[in-house]
Image (tube, rainbow, N blue to C red):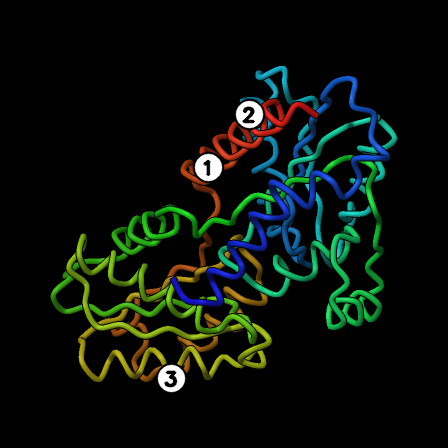
Amino acid sequence: MTPRRALVCAFLGALTFSELLSATAEQTPLLRHKVGVLLVNHGSRSKTWREALLQLEKEVATTILKNHSVSAVKTAFMEYNEPSIATRMKEFDADQFTDVIIIPVFLTVSSHSFDDIPTILKLKEDAKSLELLKLENIERYQPRARIRISPMLDFGDILQKNILRRAGQLSKNPAEEGLVLVAYGDHTYEREWAALLKKSADYVARHLGVSGYAHAWCGHVAAYDPGKTTTAIESVLAQKKRVLVIPVLVAHDEMFQVEIIGGGVEKVPSFKERVVYRPDAILPDENIRNWVTATTATLVSAIKSSGG
C-alpha cells in the first residue's frame, strides 16, 4: 500500500467510525436507529449512464430492505443531475433518519471521493473542492443524520473479476493478444489509478493468458483526447497481433465509450482486424450488487454496536 493510499484509508476509516459519528451527534435524536442508504455516483449527461446507476439502486434495494434495520435506499448524483447529495440528505433529515450510510460507486480513491463528497456534506473544508462546487453550482448541506462513508470498489477483487469476464468474452487466441484498459483517471491520484489497472491486467494475464498491456486515460487528465487511447493500443500492437480494449468505466456514456475510446480505436490502422472493442461498462455486475448489500450489512452492524 502506498503512503498516500494508507493516508486515504486512514481518513475514510476515521470518518466512518469516529469523526462522522460525532459530526452531527448533538443534533440527532438517539432514541432509536432509523438507517438509510445513499448510493453516490459521479453523475452524467448521458441517459444510459444515469439509468444504469438507478437500475443498480432497484436491484439492491429489494435485498437491503428485507433487513428491517434499513428503511430506505436512494441514489444521488454528485454533478450534472438531480437528485443531488444535498437533495437526498434533506429528504433523509425530513424523514427523521438518524443514520445514513453513503456508498460511493467509484472505482478507487479520487478527489471526488476523498475531498468533494465530504466537502459537500460539510465534513471537510477543502479549498479546491469548495472552488469546484462553486463553479459547478453544487449545493453543500450539513445533515442532521450521522454519516458513515464506505470504502470504494477497489477494496477486494470485484474489478479484476469484472475485467477478466469482459476480456474473456472478447478473446479468441490469448497467446496472440494484448490488453488495453481505458479509465477516466485522476490528476491527484494517478499513481493509485495506474496501480489498480496494472493489478487488474496482471489478474487477466494469470487467468486468461493475455499478456502485453498498456492503459490510457479518457477523462480530463487526458483532455478527453481519443489519441491517448490510440497510442496505448499501438504500443501493445508492437508486441501482439491483436489487442482487447476494455473501458474501465462504471456505466456507459456515449461521449466516453463511443466518441473518445471508440474514436481512438478507429484511428488505429486496420483496426477492424487488429483491435477487439465493445463499448460496454462495469455495470451491470452481480458482484457489485453483492458488494453493495454486503457493505451495507457491515455498516448497519457497526451502527447497532455503536450504541448511539
Location of residue 13 with respect to 67 vertically, above or below = below
Give the Cα distance between marks 2 and 1. 15 Å
Q: Quadrant of the C terminus?
A: top right
The location of residue 88, given as percent across then percent down, is: 78, 40
Mark 3 and mark 2 in contact? Answer it, CB < 8 Å. Answer: no
Task: Give the mark count.
Answer: 3
The location of residue 302, given as percent across then percent down, is: 57, 29
Query: Going 18% across and 52% down the picture, which residue do you hit?
Result: 207
The residue under label 2 is which amino acid type?
Ser
Residue carrying label 2: 301
Residue 191 in which image quadrant: bottom left
Find numbered disc 1 in the image and state the secondary structure of the residue it sits on: helix
Query: Going 24% across and 57% down the picture, which residue do you hit?
Result: 204
Q: Is residue 130 left or right of residue 11?
A: right
Q: Is residue 158 left or right of residue 63?
A: left
The residue under label 3 is which amino acid type?
Thr
Give the Cα distance between marks 3 and 2. 48 Å
Foreground residue, 294 or 7?
A: 7
The numbered dot on residue 291 is 1
